[in-house]
Amino acid sequence: MDAPAQLQLFYCDHYDFPLQPGHKFPLQKYRLLRKRIAGDDRFALSPSTFADVNALLRIHSREYVESFLDGSISHLAMRRIGFPWSRELVLRTLASAGGTLLATGAALRDGFSGNLAGGTHHAFRHEGSGFCVFNDLAVSIAYAREELGVRRAAVIDLDVHQGDGTAAIFRGNSNVFTLSLHGASNFPFHKQTSSADLELPDKTDDDQYLDTLQRGLQLIWSFDPEFVLFQSGVDALESDRLGRLSLSRNGLMQRNRIVLEETKRRGIPVVITLGGGYSEPINLTVDAHQDTFLAAADIYGPPVACRST
């Protein structure tokens, strides 16, 4: 597959939503990241369209989807998600999931695509959790399998928090492999069972992390997926307020290259979704997210001689 002239990325930060002062969700990182990437001509950025409700219903229960969309969802359910309900949040959520759906189609055509949002891996079939309303990873796998001819799909979830919603949704599904590399003592405190869970102790450093990652990836390649979703959370950084691990920026850069060089070598279409990142100052998070896409441009983009100047 020839490298596309530009790598297709999708964004949804133009749909803002209200949060109370001091809320720990780093809403501004999405816009900051897009503004940085917009200056790199190796990328083509497009606004996300809304996920179709029928796509959501392949994974989530009708009662849950409709109650969130119309605002009848309970205060307790929204408290578990971690956001106050608002019409603006509905639009942002639909656009975030829509971005991963668009990226899935683009990746299966071009070999690579990404969403400058998404990775909402704590959402279950009947409820959301941990800043996640709908599970865009699961929704996109269902779309790829039912409409785009994919048989086997895999999730490489490298957020510091276990992808518990994704694990629960696909438990027992022999056509989907879920790998989660996460902090053993971190949220969620009641873990689910992924296809492979590799738990890391607090203060894990670069070397230990990358050794563990290689073990996990061997399981992915043995599964022989036809499509991969890379949940590329950067909350394993030592500077992260919620992470508890001790990875350096360079360690995360190596992580990204290990994953993407191998998907490219094996010819497996891959979508990057953002996932978590809670460092202060926020530029540390944005730097790490940007590094992920810069690695993708180096690996999947056109040769240097073909780039515009």
Image: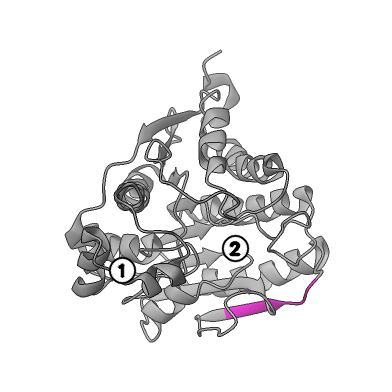
Q: Nearer the viewer, residue 13 or 211?
A: 13
Q: Secondary structure at mark 1?
A: loop
Q: Position of residue 53 (x, y in %)?
A: 19, 58
Q: Position of residue 300 (x, y in %)?
A: 52, 40
Residue shown at 46% from the left, 48% from the top? 117
Other residues around mark 1 within 10 Å, as few (<14) / some (14–19) / many (≥20): some
Other residues around mark 2 within 10 Å, as few (<14) / some (14–19) / many (≥20): many
Q: Mark yes or no: residue 149 visible.
A: no
Asked if residue 109 is positioned above or below residue 298 in the image, the reply reads below
Q: Position of residue 128 (x, y in %)?
A: 39, 70
In the picture, measured across the screen, residue 119 lies left or right of residue 134, that is: right
Q: CB under 8 Å between callouts 1 and 2?
A: no
Q: Secondary structure at mark 2?
A: loop
Q: Amino acid at mark 2?
A: Asp
Q: Position of residue 159 (x, y in %)?
A: 60, 63
- Furthest-top residue in this view: 309
Q: Mark yes or no: residue 253 visible.
A: yes
Give the main secondary structure of the magenta stretch: strand
Which quarter shows the C terminus?
A: top right
Asked if residue 211 is positioned above or below residue 234 in the image, the reply reads below
Q: Which residue is mark 1?
A: 151
Q: Which residue is mark 2?
A: 159
Asked if residue 266 is positioned above or below residue 7 in the image, the reply reads below
Residue shown at 52% from the left, 59% from the top? 231
Which quarter shows the N terminus?
A: top left
- Tag in front: 1 or 2: 2
Q: Amino acid at mark 1?
A: Arg
Residues rendered magenta in the picture = 197-202
